Amino acid sequence: MVRPAVSLRSTANAPGLPPPAAGRSRSGGTRARRWAAVAATAALLTTLGSVPAIAEGPATPDRAADGARPASPAHTPPGTPEKTPVAVGYGGAVSSVDQDASAAGIEVLRRGGNAVDAAVATAAALGVTEPYSAGVGGGGYFVYYDAKRKRVSTIDGRETAPRSAGSDLFLENGKPIPFDQAVTSGLGVGTPGTPATWDSALDRWGTRSLGQVLRPAQRLARDGFTVDETFRSQTADNQERFADFPASAKLFLPGGKLPVVGSTLTNPDLARTYDLLARQGVDALYRGEIGRDIVRTVRTPPVAKDADRTVRPGDLTRADLRAYAPRSQAPSRSHYKGLDLYSMAPSSSGGTTVGEALNILESAELGRAGKGAHADGSAATDGDHGTARSGGDARLSEKRFLHRYIEASRIAFADRGRWVGDPAFEDVPTRQLLGQRFADARACLISDDKALSSPLPAGDPRHPKRCDASGTASPTPYEGRDTTHLTVADKWGNVVAYTLTIEQTGGSGITVPGRGFLLNNELTDFSFAPITPGVHDPNLPGPGKRPRSSMSPTIVFEDGRPVVALGSPGGATIITTVLQTLLNHFDRGLPLVDAIAAPRASQRNTATTELEPGLWNSPLRAELEALGHRFTKNREIGAATAVQRLPDGRWLAAAETNRRGGGSAQVVFPHGTAPTGR
């Protein structure tokens, strides 16, 4: 039976943010590390010198045909700043993976728009420059803090299954179809939610029209952006798929070849799509000609005549598009050592899983160890990578920190897999998953002397049993690792954390002919069959159901004020990226940009934990292996972006230093004196 969508009751949707939870006051040491991190950030910024100035928009070069142009000075947008991973100043901030997209958001802020306006502008520009990660054909989750009302709200813009979908959507002859065939098909395409999310956010909280905020992206699509190595590499990964779909090949393989680094790629079809959305609104998709073309493409995938790929059609209809609506719902809320964290409630598992892991770590001292000793008093060794802190206090070694972080993540993922799904269809115990009583019952599974093994059985948040690991263990299924995230703040103190996606890198691989955007393969985030026979799986497909997500756009408050907002792409690694970044900053005392840049580990209730090279090549790996941890190497995990409110009122934007070619952090007025009204 399909139940009505449940809106979680939360004081976050009542006027005024609630005070910090009783009994969760922050320890002096943790608060000191917070301010030490802020001081370190200020010192870092002092060494950076001036931040590149932000132009109001690129000049308009001559109109070009589809595809890539050779690189030349005339075709390099002259106003676009170079990428920088950190920027600080007044007037607002934008952080994304791409400098053109961040510049689009800054342009809107400079012209008087607010954080919501700028977030939609940035997202639309990412649809041009990051088309393999997000766009009109996808969906996402939008978290917004309204500074005037002191209220956090969210929009669930996740894609939905066709109303004809059953739990056997991906079964043939009773067996799951091959995953790669489900990805590259019409069968995996869900009803897009991104345009409806933009429209809903602007209608509720924006100050500009959809047409106004789409202008920078429309110009970017028409005039082109410069191809970088990341874009070329992602195209190469999809070259065989794109070649089987004429519209994808025409757009992304100009002349049948990979785009050249330094060349300019234009997308006039997407420029026209944005123009149509600007003039007709999102009804052009949900009730109009764009939607007609989406449905035709899904039901009859336009495969090249010489392709030998099996491409199954989907059953999406125009009625499915007309019926789509984003959900306005209360955020998830969790508490950690005096901080209040607001994120996405189900259908995303991000807020509940990050929150549960933090609750498990609530009573642990995770600060960095002094050179002389560990928190337990034992002597530090070079392999522990301890770092002296102000005051000389001895805290947790890097080995113990990573061990506890990995174990907390392992446990939280075990519980995520058993309990989280679309709350319109499933009885999701969100409040209990985020309860400290449940976290304490699970935390006692962690030993400092021995690693847990996976898959770990889930606990029961409705009836917690201390140290219980007697249930049936379920493995964590694969989840595509592409997506993008942007974070925005404005001069009024409003904040947006927005994660959006088309799922796999390149989505379904199918471009809607004449429209310039790829369709998602989001429905492959469903379980194809029950993960564990005989155990209810909350993530099976259903009519109009949203697949479970890991997206974790998060805003962190201290004493009722937003201090950090962040998120990341990366499929299920989104959760571990956000969790580790939060711990790096608030517990380990790293400046935000360093907390993002630090090498990552990702444990998702799998037999092995993934390590980036910085940890894989470290002596820490052998030390953790001695505890029973098993590892695999992952070249790159996530690509976080964040903004931070500094004590003097300035905004700091932070992004990756290297991952995905580095991110783009920008502010409206870098350094200097605050302009009137800031």
Image (cartoon, helix red, strand yellow):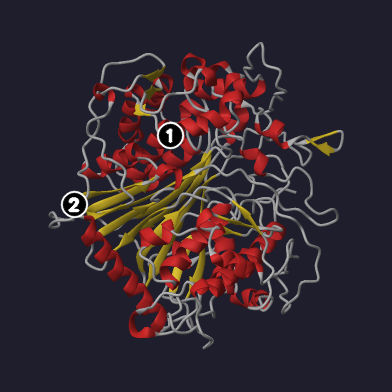
Q: Residue at x 59, y 62 (%)?
A: 353
Q: Quadrant of residue 322?
A: top right
Contact flag, marks 1 and 2 (Cβ < 8 Å)? no
Q: Which residue is at 42% across, 24% downward?
A: 260
Q: Is residue 32 left or right of residue 88?
A: right
Q: Would residue 255 be seen by someone viewing this image from the given angle? A: yes
User: Looking at numbered disc 2 in the image, what kind of residue is underneath it?
Assistant: Ser
Tag 2: Cα neighbours inside 10 Å, few (<14), some, or many (≥20)? Answer: few
Picture quarter with the C terminus: bottom left
Looking at the image, which is closer to me, 660 or 170?
Answer: 660
**Taking 112 as reference, is 629 left or right?**
right
Near-viewer residue (1 or 450): 450
Amino acid type assigned to the residue bearing label 1 in the image: Glu
Instruction: Name the disc covering residue 229, or none.
Output: 1
Q: Nearer the viewer, residue 103 or 405?
A: 405
Give the label on residue 50, or none: 2
| x and y percentages locating residue 371 in the rendered image | 43, 80
Of 120 and 30, nearer the camera is 30
Query: Which residue lies most toward the bottom here?
Result: 377
Give the secondary structure at mark 1.
helix
